[in-house]
Amino acid sequence: MIPTRDIVTPVTIVTFVVSTVTGVMLLLHWNAGLVRFSHEWLSVVFSAVALWHLARNWKAFLGYLRRNAALAAFAVSMVTSLAVTGLTGTSSTANPAVVFRSLSNATLESAAPAFGMTADGAIAALRGAGIEAEPGETLNSIGGRSGRGGAGIATILATGARR
């Protein structure tokens, strides 16, 4: 089946809207874990559809770029995008999942100092959140019992440490 405008246009609209909404959610750190996968992959779909559109309308695109205002807008947006990426991007190989996994496997006594707490302070913070915890337990065991997981317990401790 050869893609037609009847197919490509609705796909473009949907993937643009999803990419935009999930991008804003990621920017605001709101349910980032929930939307990151869909944002990344649907952005790839959006890009593929946009490239199809560009290829299909190549002559019109070249004619558009012969206009000074359009050429200036293209150049400014490209330079701005590269500058923002260069100023805010990172080449770090840090892997937050590895850090959370290690922290989640640690006992309260070992993990609490990472949050600026003692083990007793961590237990108190968790009890304040309605979660029972005992010395010697790992964040994973506490999280498994409470239905929040080790990363959820770490998040509660991190939030409690800021109070």
Image (tube, rainbow, N blue to C red):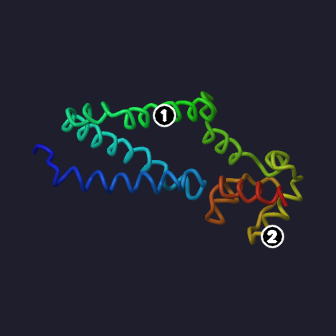
Q: Could you tell whether 2 is left or right of 28 in the image?
A: left
Residue under the image location 44 percent in, 53 percent down: 20
Q: Amino acid at mark 2?
A: Gly
Callout 1 crowding tier (Cα within 10 Å): few <14, some 14–19, many ≥20: few
Which sits in the foreground, 56 or 72?
72
Quarter of the rendering containing residue 156: bottom right
* Left or right of 72 in this view: 100: right
Q: Residue at x 25, y 33 (%)?
A: 63
Dot 1 falls on a residue whose secondary structure is: helix
Image spot of residue 60 (x, y percent): 22, 37
Question: Which corner quadrant of the image does residue 3 belong to?
Answer: top left
Measured along the vertical axis of the image, is residue 59 above or below residue 11?
above
Q: Residues within 10 Å of mark 2 (few under 14, many from 20)?
A: few
Q: Position of residue 142 (x, y in %)?
A: 70, 59
Residue 88 found in image quarter: top right
Query: Mark 2 or mark 1, which is nearer to you?
Result: 1
Instruction: Classify mark 2: helix, strand or loop.
Output: helix
Q: Quadrant of the C terminus?
A: bottom right
Q: Amino acid at mark 1?
A: Val
Labels 2 and 1 touching (C-beta < 8 A): no
Q: CA distance from mark 2 to mark 1?
A: 52 Å
Percent from the top left, x then y, of residue 74?
41, 34
Residue 154 vs residue 88: left or right? right
Q: Position of 82 compared to 126: left or right?
A: left
* Closest to the observer, 82 or 44: 82
Residue that label 1 marks = 76
- Give me the residue at 85% from left, 65% from top: 124
Q: Residue furthest left?
A: 1
Label drawn at residue 128? 2
* Closer-to-camera residue (159/74): 74
| Residue drawn at 59 percent across, 33 percent down | 89
Q: In the rendered view, would you say 123 is above or below 47?
A: below
